[in-house]
Amino acid sequence: MKHSIFSYLALGVFLWGAFCSGCGGSGSSSDSRSGGSPVVPTTPPGQASYAEPLVVFDQPGYWTRVDGSPADVSPEVARTGTSTVLLDAGPAGGMDNVTRYGHPDPFVIQSGDQIKLWCYFPAESQSAITIYLGQGGFAQYVAKTLSGKDMVGWWCFMVRKEEFSLFGSVDWQQPFDTIRIRLDSSKPHDRVHLDGLYISSHDPPQVVVTFDDGSASDYSIAYKVMKEYGLVGTSFIVTDFVGRNTNLSLAEMTEMYASGWDFANHTKSHKDLTLLDTPHMVEEIVSAKQWLLAHGFTRAADYFAFPYGRFGGTSDALRHAGVVAARTTINSLVETASGRPDRLRIPVALGLSPSVTCDMARSTVDDAVARGQSLVIYGHALTSGTPGAYEWQANDFRELVRYIAQKRDEGKLIVKTFRDWSSGL
């Protein structure tokens, strides 16, 4: 259920780069966030979640800059409401921010809560976004700076209570009544649209295991290990590579597919799409899709992963080719409770490369469970020997799969193929 007070909330979030001089450098019992009224208690992982809107940035005059001037409101872009608040780094790059002092419905952040900020980046960004939340103005406040580097399109920033830095005598039992959001960037006219701010508990954590290129180890190691634990994954196939000595054979793919493993599109020949014009991009994607369909691998033929992780300027080609969802190599867990992410820019939070230890991989799974977020994993190849540049050790993979299966059996996460997971976004 939703607490009635959040129906009226207009929470002030602000990005700020030049704080005033005193700001430093840098069970199910009812509880209360505002005015002593009961709200939904924190939800354990694996159960239903909630995401209460604190504010939708569509109210002209509600937000101001540090100098007191009104914030710029943009009706051209909006995910919720009718408009967004626009921050712009200016012609030479720099800082922009908006603030709400004396928020009419102060709120308490409790253990297990997350603050989530939905933004839209109209072009590839080089920004840093800082969220400040104050008690009684900024006599005491918490802050968190997040990287917007390389982001484009819709994005949701997530901050757990424990991740905020504290300044002054912050008392978590007391409500926050002041919010500021700040944009910093060296890029001229680097812009971000602020759409909505939320406070939420856990989503059901979900894990998606993917491999790129169609290496032979997808069958000999990944498929066989995951099958032992009742799990399936997704291979993004470069169709020209099928049947080569180091890649999957058609017979292996047929066996895997019959057991629930999905095969998705990774282009015909693994060309960098960003170096092609749109017609040739479409040709690369559609040719691979047609190959998958012709060989009976129909389930995930409309799902895609970018060669080399590069996606600039590909949106029109993806739409022309009928791509439903596309995976990048941007590093992030995926937030779904407070809105849908951009399905053509799906991030990953764990890449299986030689520099990643098994402990690091398990820690990423734990982070997904703690946050209640989706974790997309990707790798290229697995080996029983010493890993090369794009390989991960088979024993480490077995331990990671065992750990994921353990968390699944404890009811702490769900494992899906990329198609099943992204289709629900």
Image (cartoon, rainbow, N blue to C red):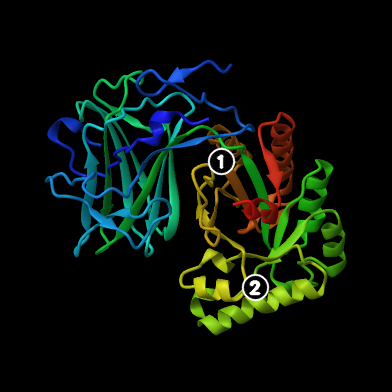
Question: Left or right: where does residue 395 sit relative to residue 314?
Answer: right
Dot 1: element: loop
The nearer-to-camera label among 2 and 1 is: 1
Quarter of image, res 181: top left
Q: Position of residue 299 (x, y in %)?
A: 75, 62
List the residue tagged with mark 1: 373
User: Looking at the picture, which amino acid does disc 1 mark?
Assistant: Gln
Number of numbered discs overlaid on the protein picture: 2
Q: Position of residue 141 (x, y in %)?
A: 27, 29
Residue 356 image offset from top left, x and y in percent = 58, 46
Does dot 2 land on a helix, a strand or a loop? Answer: loop
Q: CA distance from mark 2 to mark 1?
A: 29 Å
Q: Is residue 47 above or below residue 305?
A: above
Q: Mark yes or no: residue 50 visible.
A: yes
Q: Position of residue 231 (x, y in %)?
A: 77, 45
Residue 267 has which mark?
2
* Horizontal arrangement in the rendering, residue 118 relative to residue 364 (left or right): left
Residue 370 lies, with reference to residue 375, above or below; the image says: above
Seen from the viewer's position, the closer of residues 387 and 313 is 313
Q: Residue at x 83, y 43 (%)?
A: 228
Q: Nearer the viewer, residue 20 or 337?
A: 337
Circle 2 crowding by C-alpha within 10 Å: few under 14, some 14–19, many from 20: many
Name above or below for residue 404 compared with residue 187: above
